[in-house]
């Protein structure tokens, strides 16, 4: 059976219906809807005059003025908005009041897809014609559409800081000669400022401020101290808050996620794990220093750092003085929250992807009722139901009285009003009066229109449930729509959402409208987890504005990649992350995976160098995940170097004879030496038989071979019932 829109992250079923979420805030706090109708919001910035500029992923920069979303966009850019691309960053110049400069981070479409920072000059609520000025073009993007970063902030030094994702290639985060996986520090015109940590080399290197980042989707600059905290979205285990105030830091990705024991990497000041519940999650999508010039919040909140998670819909805070400790602030907030920010008015604000809205969080505990959630009007078909609701702050307790067309409704005296089995007679204007000992407040009117109209029926015909995909291929989609009153609906009534789901969160794709069939391409780079799928959602709208929906999930085909080394226990890297062998990884078929081998390596006092892969690939290679399970082995050789340090030996140890260059010792525990035979053969399989048996300096039995020529040999250790052979490379 088709999944009838079960995901909690998707939009509600009918036009005009808003999900009522039981947000949990501290006493006397509540969230207030500022405005809705913002399509896939990504970032926001406050102007000194109180206007709010909000970036829509599809390319429009919108303006909210006096709590109203203006119809005309400030500017509309042509962008590539696949996956996490699009218009994804906005910041105002520190001197905006005089120069009117606004900077946008956006993805330029075409054959050379890349991210760009462009500066515009405001002319009132729209951009001045012809004012676009390119600040900097960033490095080309791969076919992977995720991990673009995009956040921008000005530091207290007047320099522009820019957070850039590693474009789903972890190795780039450690490469100082690319912008990917970095925090940049640049002048307003894109040039290299003085004081950067890497002043020589490539142009990319000169602009790098910090590196080793995966997907720094947001960061925040303290308004007075200038401290910089970067929120880095993790992969499988940890979400990080990193201190990038000082330049030159390496935060470790992909070699480290969360806390690391490697002194070369700077650990986050705070990290939380993936999982369910408050304080755990999947993606840190916002963070802000709460240090406003003025606020009516209790003083205990001032100076804290607030941050939010995309999946578990909570807001937490951490203390920044002394030991960093976490506190829960809010749970069950409106879904898919991003870009939490401290507003000019001393309130917290955040955007919601699933609600297409901007909310602010207000505090009030001593006054007459203040309504924070207004009842919302809707159009309904006869026989359906509707629930109106209201929320308020102020001195408790409250009493409620609902009215229709200004007349009290008997027994309608709670915070919600539900009307079932609607008829035309239920149409009208609904509002509620909220009262406490200090006074009263009357809500906005919510218009209910009940029509004799059946819901349209949407049906996805292609793909069918159970369809699977391979990365790098395309999927066709098609559907039909019928309505009892309108008959067969035209293509103009269709809207498609194709969302990429990873674990418990999703990556929105741009809506496809006005067609009843089409094709979409599945990338072969990007998210490497196998816990992914696509959800195709068809929404159809009839002539009366009522909507019907259908959805189909398309799951990936999977392959197990098994990795070994010879000898076992050595490391390889998969997409830049270390794996100790033997190891197995489930991967989506067709997905490009990058294999690497650190060389040389040391294991149990022996030194090894990489020889070859069993598939004859190069040491670092990119392969498409095959259809069938695959076993890959990295072959190593023992390296005989020029030095040896005496140490307790519990297994075979091969090293040069310290007394003479080129002489080779094979050292075994004395007890083991009585049960084995040692043989050494050259490249022609001829035995090298001359050796002496002595007691070594570290308490083992030594089989010492005479001077060997530089070359490759094979060491054979014959144990009862088993022979172990290992290549031996004599380098000098």
Image (tube, helix red, strand yellow):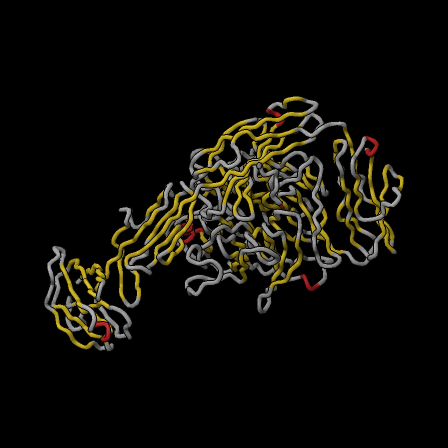
Q: Position of residue 713 (x, y in %)?
A: 16, 59
Residue at 57% in and 32% down: 496
Q: Quadrant of the N terminus?
A: top right
Left or right: 578, with 220 as reference point? left
Residue lying at the far front of the rendered structure: 721
Left or right: 318, with 415 as reference point? left
> Does residue 259 sit above or below 20 in this rendering?
below
> Does residue 79 sit above or below 302 in this rendering?
above
Residue placed most toward the observer, 414 or 140: 414
Residue placed most toward the observer, 248 or 316: 316
Residue at 69% in and 46% down: 50
Residue at 23% in and 69% down: 643
Q: Quadrant of the C terminus?
A: bottom left
Q: Position of residue 531 (x, y in %)?
A: 49, 47
Whether residue 154 is visible to the viewer of this picture, yes or no, is no
Residue placed most toward the observer, 293 or 115: 115
> Does residue 425 sit above or below 690 in this rendering?
above
> Does residue 267 sit above or below 113 in this rendering?
below
Q: Position of residue 242 (x, y in %)?
A: 52, 59
User: Quadrant of the rendered structure where residue 127 is?
Assistant: top right
Whether residue 395 is visible to the viewer of this picture, yes or no, is yes
Q: Position of residue 564 (x, y in %)?
A: 32, 55
């Amino acid at each position: 059976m088709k999944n009838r829109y079960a995901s909690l992250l998707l939009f509600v079923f009918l036009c005009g219906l808003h999900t009522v979420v039981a947000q949990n805030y501290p006493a006397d706090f509540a969230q207030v809807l500022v405005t809705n109708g913002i399509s896939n919001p990504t970032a926001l910035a406050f102007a000194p005059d109180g206007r709010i500029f909000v970036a829509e992923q599809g390319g429009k920069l919108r303006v909210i003025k006096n709590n109203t979303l203006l119809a005309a966009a400030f500017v509309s850019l042509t962008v590539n908005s696949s996956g996490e691309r699009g218009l994804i960053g906005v910041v105002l110049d520190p001197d905006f009041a005089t120069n009117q400069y606004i900077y946008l981070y956006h993805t330029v479409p075409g054959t050379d897809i890349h991210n760009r920072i462009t500066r515009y000059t405001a002319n009132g609520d729209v951009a001045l014609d012809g004012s676009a000025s390119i600040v900097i073009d960033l490095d080309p993007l791969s076919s992977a559409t995720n991990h673009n970063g995009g956040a921008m902030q000005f530091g207290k030094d007047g320099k522009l800081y820019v957070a850039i994702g590693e474009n789903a290639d972890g190795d780039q985060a450690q490469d100082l000669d690319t912008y990917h996986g970095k925090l940049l520090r640049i002048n307003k015109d894109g040039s290299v400022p003085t004081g950067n940590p890497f002043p020589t080399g490539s142009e990319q290197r000169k602009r790098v401020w910090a590196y080793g980042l995966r997907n720094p989707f947001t960061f925040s600059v303290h308004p007075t101290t200038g401290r910089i905290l970067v929120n880095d979205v993790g992969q499988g285990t940890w979400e990080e808050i990193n201190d990038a105030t000082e330049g030159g830091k390496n935060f470790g990705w992909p070699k480290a996620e969360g806390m690391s024991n490697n002194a070369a990497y700077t650990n986050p000041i705070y990290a939380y794990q993936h999982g369910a519940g408050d304080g755990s999650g999947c993606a840190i999508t916002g963070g802000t220093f709460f240090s406003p010039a003025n606020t009516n919040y209790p003083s205990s909140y001032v100076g804290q750092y607030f941050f939010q998670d995309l999946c578990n819909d909570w807001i937490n805070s951490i203390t920044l003085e002394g030991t960093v400790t976490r506190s829960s602030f809010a749970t069950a907030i409106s879904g898919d929250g991003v870009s939490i920010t401290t507003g000019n008015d001393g309130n917290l604000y955040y955007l919601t992807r699933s609600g297409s809205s901007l909310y602010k969080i207000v505090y009030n505990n001593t006054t007459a009722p203040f309504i924070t959630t207004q009842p919302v009007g809707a159009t309904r078909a006869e026989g359906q139901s509707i629930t109106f609701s209201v929320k308020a702050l102020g001195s408790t307790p409250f009493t409620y009285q609902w009215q229709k067309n200004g007349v009290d409704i008997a027994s309608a005296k709670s915070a919600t009003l539900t009307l079932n089995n609607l008829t035309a007679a239920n149409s009208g204007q609904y509002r509620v009066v909220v009262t406490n000992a200090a006074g009263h407040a009357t809500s906005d009117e919510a218009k209910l229109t009940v029509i004799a109209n059946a819901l349209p029926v949407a049906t996805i015909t292609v793909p069918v449930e159970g369809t699977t995909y391979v990365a790098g291929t395309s999927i066709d989609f098609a559907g039909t729509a019928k309505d009892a009153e309108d008959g067969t609906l035209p293509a103009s009534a269709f809207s498609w959402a194709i969302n990429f789901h990873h674990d418990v969160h999703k990556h929105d794709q741009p809506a496809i409208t006005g067609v009843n069939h089409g094709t979409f391409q599945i990338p072969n780079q990007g998210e490497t987890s196998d816990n992914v799928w696509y959800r195709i959602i068809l929404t159809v709208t009839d002539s009366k504005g009522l909507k019907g929906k259908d959805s189909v999930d398309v799951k990936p085909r999977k392959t197990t990649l098994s990795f070994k080394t010879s000898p076992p226990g050595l490391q390889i890297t998969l997409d830049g992350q270390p794996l100790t062998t033997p190891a197995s990884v489930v991967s989506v078929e067709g997905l490009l995976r990058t294999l690497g081998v650190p060389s040389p390596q040391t294991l149990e006092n022996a030194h090894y160098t990489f020889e070859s892969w069993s598939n004859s690939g190069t040491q670092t290679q990119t392969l498409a995940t095959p259809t069938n399970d695959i076993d890959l082995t990295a072959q190593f050789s023992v390296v005989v170097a020029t030095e040896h340090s005496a140490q307790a030996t519990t297994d075979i140890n091969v090293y040069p004879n310290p007394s003479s260059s080129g002489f080779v010792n094979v050292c075994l525990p004395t007890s083991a030496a009585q049960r084995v035979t040692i043989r050494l053969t050259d490249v022609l399989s001829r035995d090298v038989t001359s050796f002496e048996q002595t007691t070594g300096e570290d308490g083992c039995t030594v089989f010492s071979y005479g001077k060997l020529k530089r070359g490759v040999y094979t060491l054979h250790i014959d144990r009862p019932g088993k022979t172990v052979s290992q290549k031996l490379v004599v380098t000098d």
